[in-house]
Image (cartoon, coloured by chain):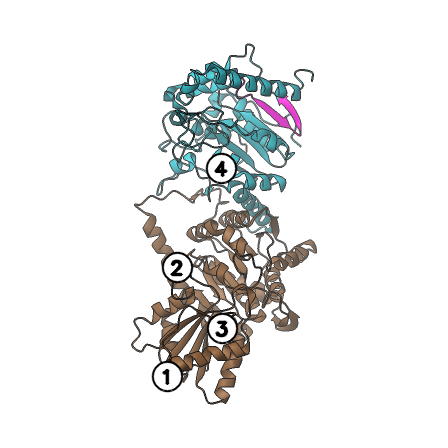
Amino acid sequence: MVHEQPNISPVPFKKLAERPELLTGGHRLCAGCAESIIVRQVLMASRYPVVVVLGTGCLEVATTVYPSTAWEVPVLHCAFENAAATASGVQAAYHALKASGRLALPELRVVVFAGDGGTYDIGLQSLSGALERGTRFTYVCLNNEGYMNTGIQRSSATPFGAETTTTPAGEQATGKIEWRKNLTDIIAAHNIPYMAQSAPSAYRPHDLKTKAAKAFEAEGPSFINVLSACTRGWRYEPEQTIAVTELAVETCYWPLFEVIDGKWQLNYKPRRKRPIRDWLAVQGRFQHLLQKPELVEQIQQRIDREWETLLERCGEIAR
Amino acid sequence: MNELTARTGNQAVALAMRQVEPDVCAAYPITPSTIIMETYAQFVADAEARTQLILVESEHSAMSACVGAACAGARVMTATSAQGLALMHEVLYIAAGLRLPIVMAVANRALSAPINIHGDHSDAMGSRDAGWIQLYAQDVQEVYDTVLQAVRIAEHPSVRLPVMVCFDGFTISHGVEELKLLADEEVKDFVGVYKPERYLLDIEHPETFGALVLPDYYIEIKRQQREAMTQALAVIPAIDREFGQRFGRSYGVLEEYQLADAQVAAVVLGATAGTLRAAVDQLRAKGVKAGLLRLRAFRPFPAAQVVRSLSQVKAVAVLDRADSPGTMSGPLLEDVRAALYDAALLPRVAGLVYGLGGREMDEAQAQAVYQTLLDVEQQARPTTSAGYVGLRP
């Protein structure tokens, strides 16, 4: 169950900004990377101390370069594909140690940060297992739609037509030929108390932290898939990160919604849905598509179909 | 103390675990170790052990959850075999690299392909460089005693390394033997309470575990692991001596049988030592100076003691229950020959592979091994290597 009215006082951003930073500056993420924005917003939403488990990826390698660390909370990095299983172990240890009384342990929250690589692909088994076992943790997928840490290779989260180093455009190729995997449906099928899709936003600044707060209150596993714009992999200027993310939302490429105890709920419906071409045009990884209107149309139709399906599920339109 | 019963090796592991009562156990079934977890699950269900059991979806996740739990500050145990051990391979290195005192029972079984569920040592041998301590037991009693000792060895402040307790699949895991059990309080008193120096759930003192280490520091951290393994060479017999003083049984890092004046000797790990001891007895009755060296610690490898045990012997057969194709024989042969290389006196050392995929060595074959050594000793035949015991003609 997720409480309908979570006990989160809507703390203004100004007050949140006064809290100590749990991910400090000085890390080595690229200028313009959305990951640190997302991590800081998620962490500031927790009422309780957090323990973080990281999957291998940009965030991990950029924030834990021995002998320094950017983290002011306990962090464990184990391997690439097993953050969820590792978190199951941490959670079990917490229960055991608390029950035995050997350590004085406060209430806390276990948070996993992993990329789409470690979540959609190599980490899917581990995630599914942890969800099935009902491990109480919040899994945040930092979805930059590719294996960015290793230099921009395709993942199953990479969208149709995107150029990556393993799906380059060329004489006889137009980027990735498969549509992105629908991880949200897969997660929803695990019947966990709380699941959401979110993105860092200037126009909807409370979306991510509110969802994180709800996730932390869920009595069971919770999952948030967050679109994480990547200036290097998507090829746009670093200062455009939030603007590019807004386009994903306004074109309905990346809808914002929640699934609370199995009930689908839309969080934002653009008053004027923008054409998908607006989203494609600002990113270098899609430039080769702009000369192929039939592919752009194909993408538009598929996005429209998915949006319609989501609207139906959320009860926004009749079937 | 020493309540006499009859149990299989798997049951002995589960009983030892019940008395240690680890905080967390994450495991996945695989033959022939499955029964350990089934037995343990029943203990937990009957409130005879307070352990958080995580019934994971693969062995890779089993070891990952063990790493998470151990890093968090819990005492952690698990069990596996063969493909399961192979599947958790990368995480074994992580457990050792993070210096986590996880104890794992391994009912040794052949690695595919071909698929074969029976006993040999290829699984543990495949992980011999992962940084885990590897101890090989030869019977049910030793499995029980070694699991208990392993907890102390792993958690020892000079060591802080994970420990594998290895025993032959089916032969020991499923064979019923006499087992003397300690009392619950005796075990609790012996293993004590786990007090980690640093742990993830220490919210007041946040640390980052599993950091990225670039070329400027990586080797030094690995060197610390090597030092810990070296320390283990002293800690293993020390814990074993303490165990012996308290409970009347001790094993050391190796066992010498009729070795003092032996002219020919075999070197072996695990259960087949029993068959070889019988062969030694028969040969001694006929006046042949035969002996046996059974290694209990394989990692760390007790090189100095091996040299002392074997140096006066004229011909040695190292029996490997795992093969290392492209080398002279198996992994045990490599380590024994490497240890002997600088010895003042050098026996002739032959390597033989036996028992792969569960084909047990019988007494006739054991005798034949010694006969080969006698021929080698008398230089009637050159040193043989890469031979197999009991190969079909």
Q: Residues within 10 Å of mark 2 (few under 14, many from 20)?
A: many
| Residue B179 - label | none
Disc 4 packing (10 Å; few <14; some 14–19; many ≥20): many
- Residue A258 locus on image (x, y percent): 60, 25
Q: Along the line of sight, which residue is nearer the eye, B379 or A24?
A: B379
Residue B378: mark:
1
Q: Which residue is mark 2?
A: B228
Residue at the front extreme? B393
Q: For the residues carrying marks 1 and 4, which lies nearer the camera in this image? A: 1
Q: To which residue does mark 4 refer?
A: A118
- Chain in brown on the image: B
Q: Do pointers 1 and 4 mark residues of a single chain?
A: no
Task: Check if mark 4 and mark 2 are on a common chain.
Answer: no
Q: Could you tell me how far apart the alpha carbons at marks 1 and 4 are, in whole angstroms? A: 61 Å
The x and y percentages for residue A273 are: 54, 12
Mark 4 or 3: the one toward you: 4
Q: Secondary structure at mark 4?
A: helix
> Closest to the observer: A151 or A44?
A151
Q: Is residue B33 above or below residue B238?
A: above
The picture's colour for chain A is cyan
Amino acid type of the residue that numbered disc 1 sits on in the rendered structure: Gln
Q: Secondary structure at mark 2?
A: helix
Badge 1: chain ID: B
Q: Nearer the viewer, mark 4 or mark 2?
A: 4
Q: Which residues are magenta?
A: A252-265
Considering the numbered disc 1 on the image, is that residue within a helix, a strand or a loop? Answer: loop
Q: Chain of mark 4?
A: A
Query: What distance separates the C-alpha of mark 2 from that of mark 1?
Result: 42 Å
Mark 3: give few (<14), some (14-19) or many (20+) Cα within 10 Å.
Answer: some
Residue B251 numbered tag: 3
- Which numbered disc flags the more N-terminal residue, 3 or 1? 3
